[in-house]
Amino acid sequence: MSSQRRAADSADGQLSIVEALIDLPFPLQEENSVREGGWSGPGFHLAVLRESQDFWDDRSEEITEAAEQELESDLAVLAATLTGRWGSPTSVDLWPYLGLDHPDPDYTAPEPLSFLSMVAGSMQVWQLPAADRWLALTIGQADPEFSFQLLAAVGEAASLRDDTGGHGG
């Protein structure tokens, strides 16, 4: 039996969620109503495509690595499909979006980059043709006891070109 809880039961279900996010208009204010396990706001959508068990009871390396591997397999299948449509993704380092090295001490990255930078180190990004948007996939974990999450994000193209100080999108 799999140790994973799924937000989407299959690669086709995950792809369906991604396609819906791409076409969905951005709301004027933050809301949690995009899909169960997702949220949106001005200029972004974010969805949990699949989620592992949590690790409150057992954080052993064997358990956590197996859970992460399952999500990485799902990410690879989905990434291959998206690469077939739009070409190879760009790997984007999320560190600059934490703002730790930013000259403005009050800097906050735009969403969903602010959230993603707190749970993942990098993301795979496709620039969407015919839309001024990007699509990203990553695996994130907010804390060692929390579940791993396969995340899909859609954002305005300009959010990857903000002034993080040395980031290239």
Image: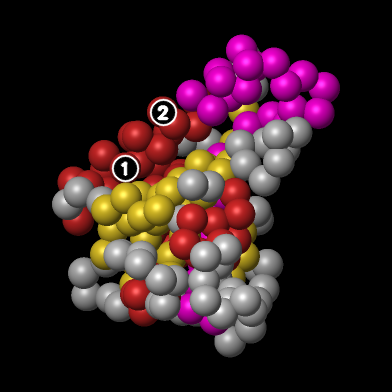
- The quadrant in which residue 6 appears is top right
Quarter occupied by the N terminus: top right
Nearer the observer, 97 or 17: 97
- The quadrant in which residue 104 appears is bottom right
Q: Residue at x 17, y 52 (%)?
A: 87
Rendered image: mark on residue 79: 1
Q: Is residue 143 above or below residue 1?
A: below
Q: Residue at x 36, y 79 (%)?
A: 158
Q: Is mark 2 on a helix, strand or loop?
A: helix
Residue 84 at what x, y percent from top left?
18, 46
Nearer the observer, 35 or 55: 55
Residue 141 at what x, y percent from top left?
62, 42
Color encoding of the figure: secondary structure
Type of amino acid at the residue the image marks with label 1:
Ala
Q: Residue at x 32, y 50 (%)?
A: 91
10 Å neighbourhood of mark 1: few (<14), some, or many (≥20)? many
Residue 151 at what x, y percent from top left?
51, 49
Which numbered disc, 1 or 2, marks the residue that appears first in the sequence?
A: 2
Type of amino acid at the residue the image marks with label 2:
Ser
The residue that mark 2 highlights is 73
Magenta-colored span: 41-69
Q: Residue at x 62, y 76 (%)?
A: 105
- The quadrant in which residue 59 appears is top right
Residue 66 visible in this rendered orientation of the protein = yes
